[in-house]
Amino acid sequence: MSNALEIGYRHIDTAEMYGNEKEVAEAVRASGLARGDIFVTSKLNNSFHEPEAVRAAFDTTLSELGFDYVDLFLIHWPLPTLYDGDFVSTWRTLEEFHRDGRARSIGVSNFQIEHLEKLAAETDTVPAVNQIEVHPYFANDAVRGYGQEHQIATEAWSPIAQGKVLDDSTIMQIADRVGKTPAQVVLRWHIQRNDICFRSR
Ligand SMILES: NC(=O)c1ccc[n+]([C@@H]2O[C@H](COP(=O)([O-])OP(=O)(O)OC[C@H]3O[C@@H](n4cnc5c(N)ncnc54)[C@H](OP(=O)(O)O)[C@@H]3O)[C@@H](O)[C@H]2O)c1
């Protein structure tokens, strides 16, 4: 993380589930960068979907980070089989954090079209982002298309397919032709599709 900040990374994606919020914040503080120069995303873990648990989990996230706000807070998974599938009240609780300014923006992750339609029908705030799996082996175009139609930015997780694209012969040929690495070629593919992407290093 410190190396990433040193070479210019400014967008950090963490989550309660990853157990590294504290270390992320320590690296940000050690970098000497101003808080306002870094974009920090964190996510609500799966066992905290009921409103009181959401509030407690968000307090813990801010306290682990030692920040008074996050730039983006996501519901990590929609979980239609837990808590009676009531991710709508979970979302309404995230709206509180947006209103009080502790989450500059709020969004979701791993939501399918039916989950997004339910939020659209029953709540007032459109998610800023849907963070979903997208890479050349899984284009995920239906969910991306819904996002484009409804002003929900798609953020691609595992953008280089956990490294699998790096020795793909077609991608290697393109990389040779344009004088870039396979990882750079695939990140450009995401950018040209208007998706936000990030890598683990
Ligand atoms: N919302 C969700 O449910 C969800 C799910 C999965 C991931 N994510 C987020 O997405 C981020 C990225 O996804 P990801 O880590 O699964 O997949 P990824 O970024 O597609 O791939 C990461 C893997 O590729 C390797 N790698 C990266 N650049 C490389 C290069 N230039 N040459 C060789 N190997 C390279 C990494 O190796 P090293 O380990 O050696 O660096 C790592 O094993 C995660 O950090 C996480 O924040 C979110």
Image: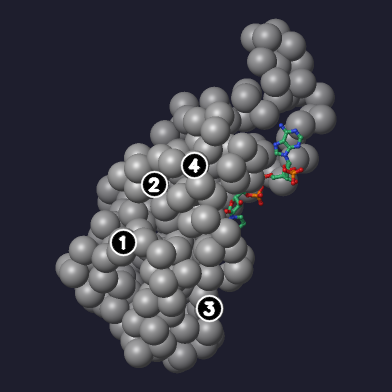
- Secondary structure state at the residue bearing disc 1: loop
Q: Are marks 2 and 1 in contact (CB under 8 Å)?
A: no
In the picture, the disc for residue 31 is 4
Q: Residue at x 47, y 83 (%)?
A: 48
Q: Which image quadrant: the N terminus? A: top right
Residue 92 in view in this figure:
yes
The residue that label 1 is drawn on is 69
Pair 3/1: label in front: 1
Please, what is the three-letter code of the amino acid marked with disc 4? Ser
The earlier-in-sequence mark between 4 and 1 is 4
The residue that label 2 is drawn on is 39
Q: Residue at x 28, y 48 (%)?
A: 151
Mark 2–mark 4 Cα distance, whole angstroms, equals 14 Å
**Above or below for 4 versus 79:** above
Front position in the image: 74 or 28: 28
**Above or below for 83 versus 61:** below
Please, what is the three-letter code of the amino acid marked with disc 1? Tyr
Mark 2–mark 1 Cα distance, whole angstroms, equals 11 Å
Please, what is the three-letter code of the amino acid marked with disc 2? Phe
Q: Which image quadrant: the C terminus? A: top right
The earlier-in-sequence mark between 3 and 2 is 2
- Secondary structure state at the residue bearing disc 2: strand
